[in-house]
Amino acid sequence: MVNKEKTRIMIDLARYDRQYGKRNYIINSYFMIDYVGRFMVGSFVSFSLCYVIVMTISVMCRFGEIMNETDITAIIKMFKPYGVYYLAGLVIYEVIVALVYAFRYSKGKRQIRVSTAKLKRLQKLQ
Amino acid sequence: MQTMIAVKDWIKGFYGKYDMIIEIVVKFAVAFAALKLMDTRLGFWDLFENPFVIILVSLFCSILPWGLETTVLAFCMLASVYKQSMEIALLLGAFLLIIALLYYSFHPGDPVVLVLTPVLLALKLPCILPLIVGLTGSFVSVIPMACGIIIYYLLGYIKTAPEIIALDDMSIADIPAKFKNVIEGIVENKEMWAVIAIIVAVLLIVYLIHLLPFAYSWYAATGVGTLIMAVSGILLDTPISVIGAVLALIISAVYVFFRYDVDYKRTDRLRFEDDDYYYYVTAIPRISVKKFGGKNKKKDEDY
């Protein structure tokens, strides 16, 4: 006869494995700081690349202005705010990324605990 | 009501049985609508004038995952824009790359929102998406939605301002001016910012209201969202019409009916306690009909 509870646990575990198994397997092999740090490095590269794109477009738009300027210090002064914007944007973006991945890590860990408890329960039923 | 619930259960069963085919059909329809929009809104690439090509590309898109389908459609759009102006294609490509790097690198779940937003705007039905995404998605979906609106207006700008974009007698020295003109043309588009503000506000309001713990909160969220959209759409002079808002309300109400199957009339408010806590629990049963035309089955009747 089919054991209803056993079947239900097995369905839950199979569903968990399909939806979150792969992601949570990675989460389980990292400490939180390493997991978050890994994505922060990636987001640093992404943000910097995006900023280079924005800067290139901005330089193209101000090309005439730059060419007309003969003093190099004036050109440096012209681009000084861009450095500040980059740092400010980077800090905000990194904070968002850190928060998102810290949340995902905690959620993943919680899901792992629940699935482990279900596995133990399944073991007891056998 | 009984019949409606029965129909709902039948449709749910039908979807469960043929979900793969339905998903392929939906993906085909989205890709087809997006490519048709590119053709009508841009119409620079002769290749897309041939319906056979559109059908072929849509068929290819229908077997891809949503993320890849969006990428294929983005490349089609870039190719179409490139036919008219290389500089604008570069600008659009940079914009898409920024979205992909900053947003989709860590929230890859909703690329379809980016495709559907311009499509629904072209169909004069932009109200549907903030209501449905607000009810089911997450509030960060405002980002692809806002980007979709920008893409829609950028495509429209290319069509309406060809004298700024396609100046063949321009020299290389004039390219910066061309970039500046397009960026200013987009940034200074008040209608675009108004649509973004309305859609973002509606999505956030719908999202927050549907989370509130009161009866019929999902329906209230759709109602409030529609009202805000219709009123602000008229006041700010945007393409959001009252008819469009009402149509969106009907579609959202149908969606809520299918998705949110609870019977508030049989709500149970329980109170119990253990050594550490008092528990105040509100239990709202789901409603369903087991067979088409059958009796309303109470799920808690076993207890």
Image (cartoon, coloured by chain):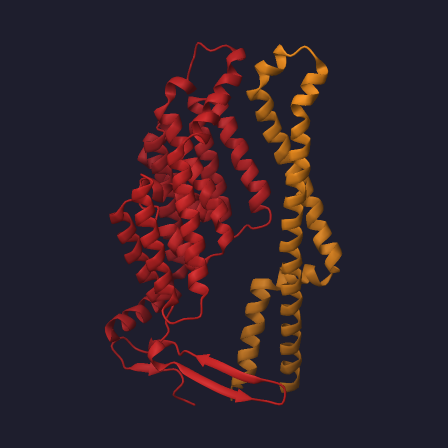
Q: Quadrant of the C terminus of chain B?
A: bottom left
Residue B59 appears in the figure: no
Measured as percent of width and height from the top left, residue A7 is found at 54, 80
- Which of the two residues, B100 or B59, is positioned nearer the viewer here? B100
Find the residue positioned furthest to the front: B235
Q: Is residue A104 left or right of residue A28?
A: left
| Rendered residue at 66%/41% (across/down) | A90
Q: Is residue B294 left or right of residue B194?
A: left
Q: Quadrant of residue B36?
A: top left
Residue B147 appears in the figure: yes
Measured as percent of width and height from the top left, residue A98 is found at 67, 52
Q: Is residue A72 left or right of residue B202?
A: right
| Rendered residue at 37%/34% (across/down) | B38
- Which of the two residues, B288 or B99, is positioned nearer the viewer here? B99
Above/below status of A23 relative to B168: below
Q: Quadrant of residue A58?
A: top right
Above/below status of A95 relative to B94: below
Measured as percent of width and height from the top left, residue B142 is found at 47, 48
Q: Quadrant of the N terminus of chain B?
A: bottom left
Measured as percent of width and height from the top left, residue B243 is found at 24, 48
| Rendered residue at 37%/31% (across/down) | B156
Spot the red chain and give its letter.
B
Q: Is residue B285 left or right of residue B234?
A: right
| Rendered residue at 25%/75% (across/down) | B2
Q: Quadrant of residue B219?
A: bottom left
Above/below status of A59 relative to B250: above
- Which of the two residues, B261 or B220, is positioned nearer the viewer here? B220
Colour of chain A in the image: orange
**In the rendered picture of this protein, how many numbered marks are placed on residues?**
0
- Which of the two residues, A2 or B99, is positioned nearer the viewer here? B99
